[in-house]
Amino acid sequence: ERLRPLIKRTIGGHYGQTPMLGNLATSNQIEAWTLPMGSISRMIRAQATHSPGHITTIGMGTYVDPTPGVGCGGAANQRALESPFHKELVTKISLGFGPEKEQEMEYLLYKALPIQVAIIRATTADSSGNLSFEHESLLCDQRIIATAARNSGGVVLAQVERLAALRSLPSRSVGVPGAMVDCVCVVDEEDRDYFHPMSFTSKYNPVLTGEVKSPCCDNIPKLSLNERKVIARRASFALKPGKVVNLGIGLPEGVAQVAGEEGSLPYITLTTEPGVFGGLPASGHEFGPATNADAIVEMNAQFDFYDGGGLDQCFLGAAQISPEGDVNVSRMSEAKLTGPGGFIDISQATRNISFLCTFTTKGLAVNIDGKQGKISIQKEGSVKKFVKKVFERTFSGEEAVRRGQKVFYVTERAVFRRTSKHEVLELIEIAPGVDLQKDIFDQMEFEPVVSPDLKVMDRRIFLDGKMNLELFGSLEERVKYREEDHTVFIDLFGISLLSEQDVTWFADSLDEILTPITFQRGPVDVVVNYDGYDLKTGLEEKYMKALEKVEAKHYRNVKRYSGKAFRAAKLNTLAKIKPWNAASVFKEMDEDGDGYLFPEELRRGIRKHFGIKLKPNELQSLCESHVTVHNFTDIVGKCLRMR
């Protein structure tokens, strides 16, 4: 009640930690909107340059989409829907491309808003108002918020914990120049724990600021063998070395713990949307920073990276899932307002997505037999997760199909996927010990498609002890044969040969893999990646003798590389598979024969002719100009350089 006279409207990404504000919104006392956090960040940045707003495809097909029958433009209550301001906040626009603007693409425009007052925080301010952030665990968007307010004719108020002498801060440590700051408020030392804490639970932790490296990442606590660990284990099968990953709050956090237990955590880069690369992300009310982070960037820069397709994989939670694969995490009822946070940005711009949830909730009890490797349902939860219709569409299955994303839904008893083959979810895996009818179909409000190749989930997921995953894939998965030019690529990253038995296994396995290839067409050209490969001292002679036999039998030529050189050689070979005629390939890819390649035609054609699966952002980049037979060769070249 004390807040209401001071607030007319609120635009936020997440209201979970501001319950009083959320209550004012749900009771319809103020105008309220929930928008993707990345879009809000760039709305502010757009205002700093007096741009009309942030133009993006993020949010299309979700509740943020203002198209009638699709979404509500992010409005969180009736008061917002009735506000004249609502029609301006999020609008759908069409932009034309090509010489005569004949190719149109749709986008959402998030309106830039003038800022009269900006309240930011830092650690130290000097007498000129220069601000530094040495004790802050995140940079967030303090700088662009100050810039937007300053350029809007507003004022900037900065809260700090200490003052420094005039111009005594090193210039490289200044995050916000004093020229942007109008007023500095210093928190009294005795009040810092209450008014200037690092988070809801930590007053100050130098490990989260990057000032100190902690050894705790080497001893991550293991999860107990329960439904949460089962889900995290199954999801972790998708982890690949060298990938950049985002983990959502809740169940997805378990993926990091499983990766730590299995030994794969050092080989992936975890990130969080407020701007952290590397390290181990904090969880719960600490969410945002990370222990032992490699780098901390501004939030708007992080979302630039995300929205541009920088993430390789993401693991996110799900509160409700519809037949079409729509997901709701932002709002479960009219009475409670949460918001999407960075969920929409992450889920719409990442190529490979895994949604994690229990099959039912509120009262679910399972029994996991760690000896036999199976699971049984002791008591079902009272709330079903797989429903006929989600309360609010935070993720669109149809939009994901249009963007060419790979989407999986992982639970403790089954795994589903959404593809263009079916308009509903497809059941692809079932847990050992689970009854298909009673434990799956009867607990869903719709009927999924059952894959003709329905598999049983790997029993290691349900066993006590480590799973001992092939962290970098089996040797069979590492050997790639390209039939067009009779070349084999062997990726040995992460392979460790520590005994004579290991050497024998390696040589025999490689011989077994190559024999069917060379039996038909003779010896092959071989390209080998030795980056990250380890051979124990003392085994060199045995290894060379064993490999000489394999080479004499199967190799025509061999080139050995490491790291980027291996990828470059692979790409070079791909580009020289065989001579190709641009005009004839273009004609074949132009399915409707209109002389232009539209995004879907280009995506399908590039995959068919060059074996490249384009990410949504890559496809959009290639189609910025109209694709015709005249610029087709340049487009293909650009596509190959992306890889």
Image (cartoon, rainbow, N blue to C red):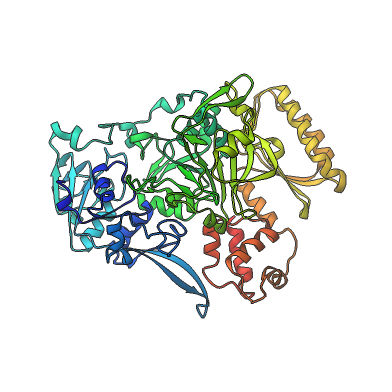
Q: Residue at x 62, y 37 (%)?
A: 493
Percent from the top left, x then y, of residue 92? 41, 67
Q: Nearer the viewer, residue 209 or 414?
A: 414
Q: Is residue 324 left or right of residue 58?
A: right
Quarter of the image holding residue 237?
top right
On the image, the x and y values in percent for residue 636 come to 62, 65
Q: Position of residue 510 (x, y in %)?
A: 76, 35
Q: Where's the C terminus, which quadrant? A: bottom right
Residue shown at the point (82%, 33%) measured from the top left: 549
- Using residue 32 as the reference point, say whether residue 574 is left or right of it: right
**Nearer to us in this view, 515 or 393:** 393
Say which residue appears at 37% left-offset and 30% top-offset.
213
Whether residue 547 is visible: yes
Front residue of 94 and 568: 94
Q: Nearer the viewer, residue 535 or 195?
A: 195
Residue 414 shows in the view: no
In x, y percent, where is residue 396? Answer: 50, 54
Residue 42 image-quadrant placement: bottom left
